Amino acid sequence: MPDKNTTVDDRLAEVRESVGRLPADIKATLQAEVARLAQEGLPAGVATPGTAMPDGDLLDAHGKPTTLTETRAGRPAVVILYRGVWCPYCNVALRFYQETLAGELDSRGVALVAISPQKPDGSLSVAEKHNLEYPVLSDPGNQVARGLGVVFSHSGELHAVQAKMGLDLTTVNADGTHELPLATAVVVDAAGTIRWIDARADYTTRSEPADILAAVDSL
């Protein structure tokens, strides 16, 4: 268990520090991409509280068809959208949510669900690598993220750097595209209505568990 004063940003700072040790050309491209996305900000039309939580034809970590509605089984839920198993920021956040958030939500009767556009084998790798006890789902075509208005694509320059590092999103994502969801946390009530949403243009940051729990406790 992390120290009670540790935040997800503390953990992510370690990842940001490691990026600083990458070769200069790769580091410069990564930093330029973060700056570009931060400057562009959130897309127009991001979902707002009071609207219905979108759903889609999803797959569990073993490739079995499911939906978000089926997964939360009538419970309120915290839904975490992340880029994929290849993303170090996502891995740190998902593990931290297991350590700090999953038990708190379970005691409140609230589901925790993580969703990415990657193929199910990537979801399974995330779950096994970090001993996640909550569902990790695959969303081919970013159906949920698209419904929330949080789909984006990285620049061609970053795709080139990713290729240099052995990553091709078109082979990782279930729909064969480069499209990704912004790092987003959503609190959904039992009726399937969005009650709180935190979408991040800067993918090096994530929603803090304390803020998520405050939103859950206001249901």
Image: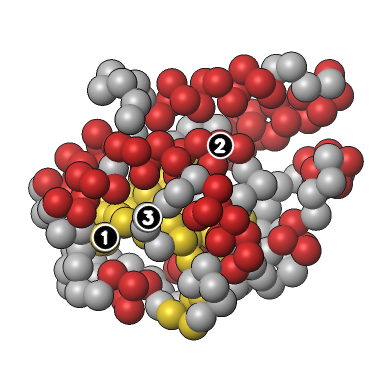
Residue appearing at x 56%, y 60% in the figure: 123
Looking at marks 3 and 1 on the same chain, the residue that comes earlier in the sequence is marked by 1
Tell whether 95 sits left or right of 78.
right
Q: CA distance from mark 3 to mark 1?
A: 11 Å
Residue appearing at x 79%, y 49% in the figure: 167
Residue designated by label 1: 111
Compared to 46, does 21 lie above or below?
A: above
Q: The residue tagged with tag 3: helix, strand or loop?
A: loop
Residue designated by label 2: 89
Three-letter code for the amino acid on which mark 1 is drawn: Ala
The label number, if any, that marks residue 133 in the structure image: 3
Looking at marks 2 and 3 on the same chain, the residue that comes earlier in the sequence is marked by 2
**Residue in the foreground of this view, choosing between 36 and 172:** 172
The x and y percentages for residue 43 are: 52, 51
The x and y percentages for residue 124 are: 56, 61
The x and y percentages for residue 81 are: 46, 54
Three-letter code for the amino acid on which mark 3 is drawn: Glu
Report if the CB atoms under discs 1 and 2 are less than 8 Å apart.
no
